[in-house]
Image (cartoon, helix red, strand yellow):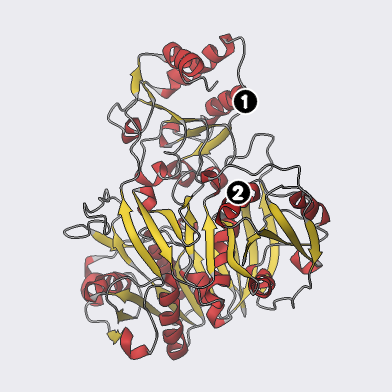
C-alpha cells in the first residue's frame, strides 16, 4: 500500500501574527515558518502504518514556493520515502490545491491520501473534502483514530456531538485531527539522511490546471481589540462585579 | 436566484445552529429555501417551515439519510443547487465536512466560516485563528458558503408557514458506511449555545479536580469547556474543547480557570461578552482579554466562588 501525504508550510503556530499596515495581508517576512500542525499528525500516522507493515511507501507532497521544500524535507526526516514539490506563486486556493493533488494522485496512484484537517493560516478546512469529491473517493475528515483493514479503513471522527465511526473503502482521503497521534521529532541522523532522499520538483504550470484565485481578497485588518479589563482583589469583589456591574449572573 | 440552506438536524429536531444559519442566509437573499435531508424527518421540515424567514422547505426523505454521510448528501444538494445562487450551511463539523465536497463538484471556491455579510458576494471571515479578519469577494457564479453560527442571532422559530416540497432521493453511496456515533448526553446546556461557559485548563491538574468546575456550572446552569491542554492531558473529553480546533463559543459570560490563554484557545472564546480569568500567573495572556481578572490559586478561589454564589438571593438562568 502506498500513502500520499500532503503537507503545507505555514507561519509557526507560536508566532503572534501581525497584519500589514496596508491591509494587503499578514507579515510573513522574517517570520518562523513550520509544517501546519495537523499535517505533522498526517505524516506520523502514515509512518506508523508503514512501521506496522501495512504500507510500503510514503510520498510527501507540498505545493508552494521554492522554500516550501523544507516542509517536505521535514516529512522525509520523520519517515517519508520521497518527496514532491509542486511549485506555485502567490495564493493557491483549496480548490486549486485539490486539482493539483488530483493530477499527482493520477500519476502516483496512492491507496490513501492523508493531510491535516485544516491549515492554520487560511483556516479553510476544505482541501481534503474537495480532493475526495473530484476523485469520487470517500472522505474521512477530522480523524482521531484509524484502523487499517483489508480493503477498508475504520475511522473515528471528532464531531461536535462526540465521536463518529465510519468505514471507508480504499482508496480514500483522510484528514487528520491533532488528537490522532503524537508526532515524533526527527533525529539528527534522520535529518541528514533526509537530505539524500529524492525530492522531485514540478512546476504547477506544467499540469495544465487553472489555479487562478476565484476569491478576491479585498483587505485584511486587525480584529477589533477588547478593551482592557480590570483585576479584582478577591472572589467577593468578582461576584459582586458580575452581579451588579456586568449583570450576567 | 434564491439561496439554499442545508439544515442540520437529528431527524426529530432541528439542531439549534440551523436557526443561526437561517438568519445569515436570509441576509444574503430574502428568497431563502431550506433543504432537509433525512429519514422520517417530517417534524424537522415542519419546524423549519414555521420560521418566518423561510420561503420554502425542500424535503428529501429516505432511510439512507438516517446519518450524515457527505457522499450521500452531496448528490442531493448538487441537484437542488441548479436553481440556487448560494449554497449555505453552518461552519460546524457538519458543514465543514459536507460543503467542500459540494463546492468542488460545482467548481466553486468555497468561502469558509464567515462572520459578517457585507453584500451577496462579499464577506468577512477570520483567518489565522482570528488574529486577522479578511474581507473577501467571491467571483464564482455559484457561491458555497459556511457561516460561523455564533456570529449570527438565531431566527425566530414561529410565525411562518412556508410550503414544504418533497423531492426525490439519489442513489446510496457504496464508498462509505456509517458504523456508530457516540454522543455524550448531558443535562447541561450545550457548549455552543450556553449563556454561561466555565472552562478549565492545564491548571486543573487532573480529571478529579474538574468537579470544582462542575459544582459552579451546576449553580450557574453553565456549560463546561476546556482548553486543548486539558483535553490532551485526559482531564476531560474532547467535545468540551474550546478553541481554533475545538468549538467557538460566544456566551454572555465565559469563565476561564487555570487557562493560560494560548492563541488557539483565545480564538474560540474571545468574542464572549464578559470574560473572567482565574489564574495564579498574573502574566498569563488570558488576562489581556479578560474583563475581570482574578490572580489567585484556583483551588482556593473556586470553593470561595461557589460559596459567594450560594450567598446570592437570585441567579439568572
Q: Position of residue B229 (x, y in %)?
A: 42, 43
Q: Residue furthest left?
A: A30
Residue A55 sits above or below residue B9 on the image: below
In the image: residue B62, left or right of residue B124: right
Give A103 or A165, whichever is nearer the viewer: A103
In the image: residue A109, left or right of residue B27: left
Give B245 or B58, whichever is nearer the viewer: B58
Mark 1, Cα crowd under 10 Å, few <14 / some 14-19 / many 20+, is few
Q: Is residue A39 visible?
A: yes
Give B275 or B300, whichever is nearer the viewer: B275
Residue at the spot of label 2:
B23
* Marked residue chain, label 1: B
* Marked residue chain, label 2: B
Mark 2, Cα crowd under 10 Å, few <14 / some 14-19 / many 20+, is many
Residue B207 sits above or below residue B167 on the image: above
Labelled disc at residue B218: 1
Q: Position of residue B110 (x, y in %)?
A: 49, 67
The residue lying at 52 percent from left, 75 percent from top is: B104
Q: CA distance from mark 1 to mark 2?
A: 31 Å
Of circles 1 and 2, which is in front?
2
Looking at the rendered structure, whether the residues under marks 1 and 2 are on a common chain is answered as yes
Amino acid at each position: 500500500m502506498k500513502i500520499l501525504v500532503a503537507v503545507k508550510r505555514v507561519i509557526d503556530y507560536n508566532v503572534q501574527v501581525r497584519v500589514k499596515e496596508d491591509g494587503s495581508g499578514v507579515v510573513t517576512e522574517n517570520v518562523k515558518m513550520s509544517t501546519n500542525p495537523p499535517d505533522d499528525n498526517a505524516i506520523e500516522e502514515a509512518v506508523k502504518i508503514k512501521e506496522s507493515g501495512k504500507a510500503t511507501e510514503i510520498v510527501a507532497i507540498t505545493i508552494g514556493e521554492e522554500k516550501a521544500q523544507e516542509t517536505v524535507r521535514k516529512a522525509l526526516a520523520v519517515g517519508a520515502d520521497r518527496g514532491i514539490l509542486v511549485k506555485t506563486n502567490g495564493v493557491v486556493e483549496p480548490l486549486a490545491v485539490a486539482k493539483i493533488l488530483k493530477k499527482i494522485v493520477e500519476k502516483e496512484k496512492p491507496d490513501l491520501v492523508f493531510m491535516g484537517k485544516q491549515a492554520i493560516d487560511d483556516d479553510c478546512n476544505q482541501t481534503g473534502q474537495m480532493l475526495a469529491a473530484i476523485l469520487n473517493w470517500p472522505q474521512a475528515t477530522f480523524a482521531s483514530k484509524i484502523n487499517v483493514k483489508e480493503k477498508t479503513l475504520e475511522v473515528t471522527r471528532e464531531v461536535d456531538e462526540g465521536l463518529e465511526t465510519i468505514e471507508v473503502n480504499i482508496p480514500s482521503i483522510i484528514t487528520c485531527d491533532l488528537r490522532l497521534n503524537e508526532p515524533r521529532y526527527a533525529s539528527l541522523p534522520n535529518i541528514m539522511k533526509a537530505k539524500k532522499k529524492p525530492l522531485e520538483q514540478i512546476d504547477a504550470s506544467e499540469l495544465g490546471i487553472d489555479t487562478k484565485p476565484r476569491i478576491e481578497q479585498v483587505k485584511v485588518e486587525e480584529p477589533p481589540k477588547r478593551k482592557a479589563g480590570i483585576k479584582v482583589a478577591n472572589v467577593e469583589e468578582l461576584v459582586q462585579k458580575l452581579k451588579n456591574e456586568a449583570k450576567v449572573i | 436566484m434564491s439561496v439554499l440552506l442545508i439544515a442540520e438536524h437529528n431527524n426529530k429536531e432541528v439542531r439549534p445552529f440551523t436557526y443561526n444559519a437561517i438568519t445569515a442566509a436570509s441576509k444574503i437573499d430574502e428568497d431563502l429555501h431550506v433543504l432537509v435531508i433525512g429519514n422520517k424527518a417530517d417534524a424537522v421540515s415542519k419546524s423549519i417551515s414555521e420560521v418566518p424567514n423561510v420561503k420554502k422547505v425542500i424535503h428529501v426523505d429516505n432511510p439512507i439519510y438516517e446519518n450524515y454521510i457527505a457522499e450521500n448528501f452531496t448528490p442531493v444538494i448538487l441537484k437542488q443547487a441548479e436553481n440556487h445562487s448560494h449554497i449555505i450551511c453552518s461552519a460546524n463539523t457538519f458543514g465543514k465536512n459536507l460543503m467542500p465536497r459540494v463546492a468542488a463538484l460545482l467548481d466553486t471556491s468555497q468561502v469558509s466560516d464567515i462572520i459578517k455579510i457585507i453584500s451577496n458576494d462579499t464577506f468577512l471571515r477570520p483567518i489565522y485563528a482570528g488574529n486577522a479578519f479578511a474581507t473577501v469577494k467571491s467571483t464564482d457564479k455559484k457561491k458555497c458558503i459556511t457561516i460561523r453560527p455564533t456570529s449570527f442571532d438565531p431566527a425566530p422559530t414561529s410565525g411562518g408557514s412556508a410550503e414544504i416540497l418533497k423531492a426525490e432521493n439519489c442513489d446510496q453511496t457504496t464508498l462509505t458506511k456509517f458504523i456508530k456515533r457516540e454522543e455524550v448526553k448531558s443535562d447541561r446546556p450545550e457548549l455552543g449555545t450556553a449563556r454561561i461557559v466555565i472552562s478549565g485548563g492545564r491548571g486543573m491538574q487532573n480529571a478529579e479536580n474538574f468537579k470544582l468546575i462542575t459544582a459552579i456550572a451546576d449553580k450557574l446552569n453553565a456549560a463546561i469547556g476546556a482548553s486543548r491542554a486539558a483535553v490532551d492531558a485526559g482531564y476531560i473529553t474532547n467535545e468540551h474543547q474550546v478553541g481554533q480546533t475545538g468549538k467557538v463559543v460566544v456566551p454572555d459570560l465565559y469563565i476561564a480557570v487555570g487557562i493560560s490563554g494560548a492563541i488557539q484557545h483565545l480564538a474560540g472564546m474571545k468574542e464572549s461578552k464578559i470574560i473572567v480569568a482565574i489564574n495564579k500567573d498574573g502574566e498569563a495572556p488570558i488576562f489581556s482579554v479578560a474583563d475581570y481578572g482574578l490572580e489567585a490559586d484556583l483551588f482556593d478561589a473556586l470553593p470561595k466562588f461557589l460559596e459567594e454564589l450560594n450567598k446570592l438571593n437570585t441567579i439568572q438562568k
